[in-house]
Image (cartoon, rainbow, N blue to C red):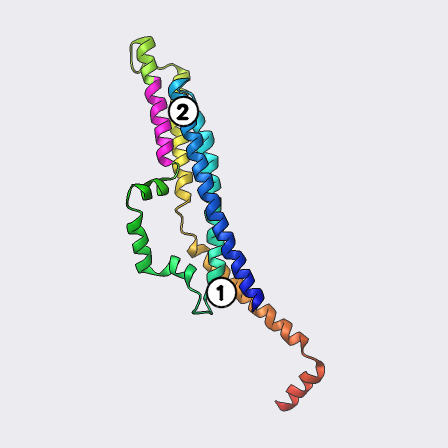
């Protein structure tokens, strides 16, 4: 029993650690983005494109941390909370409809939008400002807003493509892994129960087996 409680404590500490790491990565992503964005305003608008080198990998790291938290949560629900009515935290966070509706209401404000948007709004700013500065430069140089050469067209399309990639990667963070993870965890739980049951039977001595057979 103590070993189970120790395992549960370690798993919950791992969730807390992952969530703290996620907040730190999210904060670093914003700091680096703002730094490059300001340099883009002051030095060269091509630095707006460089922000995607920050946004895409950092969003992937955030997604991976959320995926790891989902795996640990599914394990806790399956191996600890399913047979113990006194343990309910992970189940409440994924299954209790009233609580989920409450959480949805809490994230409808500006702060909730920023957290859920992840890197999308940052990518939009980077792409929009790059295209805007590119068109502005063409007005200054050529006197026409759409007098773009092949290089300008390439980089404009590149900025749009990077923004689309950012949106797609950010959407992965909203995937509900519960339908995929819980059947796997349930299957593994049944396998563990079966394996332990076989192990107990193998540990029964021949004398006890004969005694049990005689009773039968």
The dot on residue 139 is none
| Residue 35 location (% of width, % of height) | 43, 27
Task: Name the residue nearer the viewer: 99 or 160.
Answer: 99
Is residue 145 visible in the rendered structure shown here? yes
Task: Name the residue nearer the viewer: 180 or 130.
Answer: 130
| Element marked by disc 2 | helix
Is residue 158 visible in the rendered structure shown here? no
Main structural element of the magenta stretch: helix, strand or loop? helix
Note whether 54 is above or below 111 in the view shown: above
| Residue 116 location (% of width, % of height) | 36, 43
Q: Residues within 10 Å of mark 2 (few under 14, many from 20)?
A: many
**Magenta-drawn segment:** 120-134
Note whether 114 is above or below 95 in the view shown: above
How far is disc 2 from disc 1 in space, using C-alphas? Answer: 48 Å
| Residue 194 location (% of width, % of height) | 57, 70
Q: Which residue is mark 1?
A: 80
Q: Which residue is mark 2?
A: 48
| Element marked by disc 1 | helix
Count of all numbered marks drawn on residues in the image: 2
Residue shown at 55% from the left, 65% from the top: 4
**Residue 24 in magenta?**
no
Earlier-in-chain disc, 2 versus 1 = 2
């Amino acid at each position: 029993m103590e070993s189970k409680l120790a395992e549960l404590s370690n798993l919950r500490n791992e969730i807390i650690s992952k969530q703290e790491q996620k907040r730190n990565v999210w904060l670093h992503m914003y700091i680096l983005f703002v730094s490059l964005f300001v340099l883009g305003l002051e030095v060269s608008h091509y630095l707006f494109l460089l922000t995607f080198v920050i946004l895409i990998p950092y969003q992937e790291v955030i997604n991976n941390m959320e995926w790891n938290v989902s795996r640990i949560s599914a394990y806790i629900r399956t191996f600890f909370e399913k047979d113990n009515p006194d343990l309910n935290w992970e189940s409440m966070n994924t299954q209790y409809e009233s609580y989920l509706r409450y959480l949805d209401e809490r994230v409808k404000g500006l702060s909730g939008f920023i957290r859920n948007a992840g890197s999308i709004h940052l990518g939009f700013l980077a792409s929009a400002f790059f295209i805007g500065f590119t068109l502005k430069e063409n007005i200054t140089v050529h006197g026409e807003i759409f007098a773009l050469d092949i290089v300008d067209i390439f980089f404009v399309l590149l900025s749009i493509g990077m923004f689309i990639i950012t949106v797609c990667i950010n959407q992965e963070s909203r995937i509900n892994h519960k339908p995929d993870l819980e059947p796997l965890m349930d299957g593994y739980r049944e396998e563990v129960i079966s394996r332990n049951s076989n192990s107990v039977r193998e540990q029964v001595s021949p004398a006890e087996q004969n005694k049990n057979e005689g009773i039968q």
